[in-house]
């Protein structure tokens, strides 16, 4: 156990949620709830007073919402780690939170032990994501160019290999091959294997 407990602040506009979360940390020796706030503006005030190490932040609140509060905290107190704790897992919500610079994104159905672990991980500089969020991010096509693995698939396509042959060569499933190709098509702005090969060659990718 550290010499001083990790200092945690809870930000949520629902008192019953704050009470429930505080109760989940009542008997955790290395984590102490030092402040609560009901909206983003109050969170900024309490952050200055309580100096938490980690903040559990709701997203949708009246006044200054979670993302707005996170952006301000990142400027005023860059040392504070913020974990979003919300019921919303839409792409838009996740993207806005990630862009604001959060250390984690969890859903409110997370079990007690997961919350404890998340606070410790964030305080230590790690990142924490709800499993469903992590899966969505992995499956979401990147706005960047094709990844190394996607280019490996595309090179085999250029040699005339079928999905089954590509899967066997790269030791992955055919479903994974199809997913990689779908992402390649999106990134290159094409809708066929042949077009993907042509564009990739023109750009010097393969």
Image (cartoon, rainbow, N blue to C red):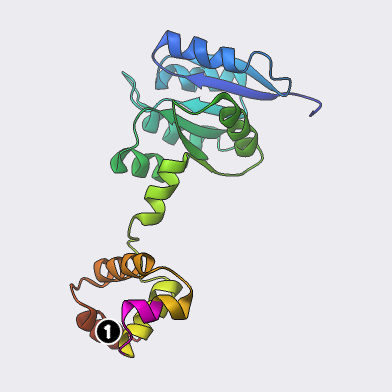
Q: Position of residue 38 (x, y in %)?
A: 42, 14
Q: Quadrant location of residue 187? A: bottom left
Tell me, yes or no, if residue 184 can be seen here.
Answer: yes
Between residue 78 and residue 128, name the one nearer to us: 128
What is the total number of numbered labels drawn onto the structure image? Answer: 1
Say if 164 sits above or below 62 in the image: below
Q: Residue at 63% of width from left, 38% of height from top?
A: 121
* Residue 10 to residue 53: above or below: above
Q: Answer yes or no: is residue 205 visible.
A: no
x, y percent for residue 19: 51, 9
> What is the crowding at mark 1: few (fewer than 14 residues within 10 Å), some, or many (at least 20)?
many
Q: Is residue 32 above or below residue 115?
A: above
The image quadrant where one finds the N terminus is top right
Using the image as rendered, state which of residue 174 and residue 46 is in the foreground: 174
Residue at (33, 64) in percent of width and height: 179
**Looking at the image, which residue is at 36% across and 41% down?**
94
Q: Which residues are magenta?
A: 160-166
Query: In the rendered view, would you say 117 is above or below 147?
Result: above
Comparing 78 with 190, the one in front is 190
* Residue at figure coordinates x 48%, y 22% from the top left: 44
For mark 1, give the secondary structure: helix
Answer left or right for 122 relative to 106: right
Name the residue at the bottom extreme. 159
Q: Is residue 50 magenta?
A: no
Q: Which residue is mark 1?
A: 197
Percent from the top left, x then y, of residue 39?
A: 40, 18
Looking at the image, the residue that sits furthest to the left is 191
Is residue 165 on the magenta stretch?
A: yes
* Image quarter hosting the C terminus: bottom left
Measuring from the top left, give residue 120's x and y in whole percent. Answer: 65, 34
């Amino acid at each position: 156990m550290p010499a001083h407990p990790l200092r945690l602040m809870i930000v949520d506009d629902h008192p019953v949620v704050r009470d429930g979360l505080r109760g989940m940390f009542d008997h955790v020796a290395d984590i102490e709830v030092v402040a609560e706030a009901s909206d983003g503006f109050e969170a900024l005030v309490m952050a200055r007073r309580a100096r938490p190490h980690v903040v559990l932040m709701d997203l949708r609140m009246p006044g200054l919402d979670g993302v707005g509060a996170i952006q301000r905290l990142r400027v005023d107190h860059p040392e504070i780690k913020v974990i979003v704790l919300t019921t919303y897992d839409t792409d838009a919500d996740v993207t806005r939170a990630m862009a604001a610079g959060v250390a984690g994104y969890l859903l409110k159905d997370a079990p007690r032990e997961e919350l404890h672990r998340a606070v410790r991980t964030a305080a230590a500089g790690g990142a924490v994501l709800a499993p469903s969020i992590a899966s969505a991010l992995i499956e979401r096509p990147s706005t960047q160019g094709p990844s190394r693995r996607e280019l490996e698939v595309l090179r085999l396509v250029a040699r005339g290999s079928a999905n089954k042959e590509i899967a066997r060569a790269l030791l992955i499933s055919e479903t994974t091959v199809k997913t990689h190709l779908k992402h390649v098509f999106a990134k290159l702005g094409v809708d066929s294997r042949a077009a993907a090969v042509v564009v990739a060659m023109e750009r010097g990718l393969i």
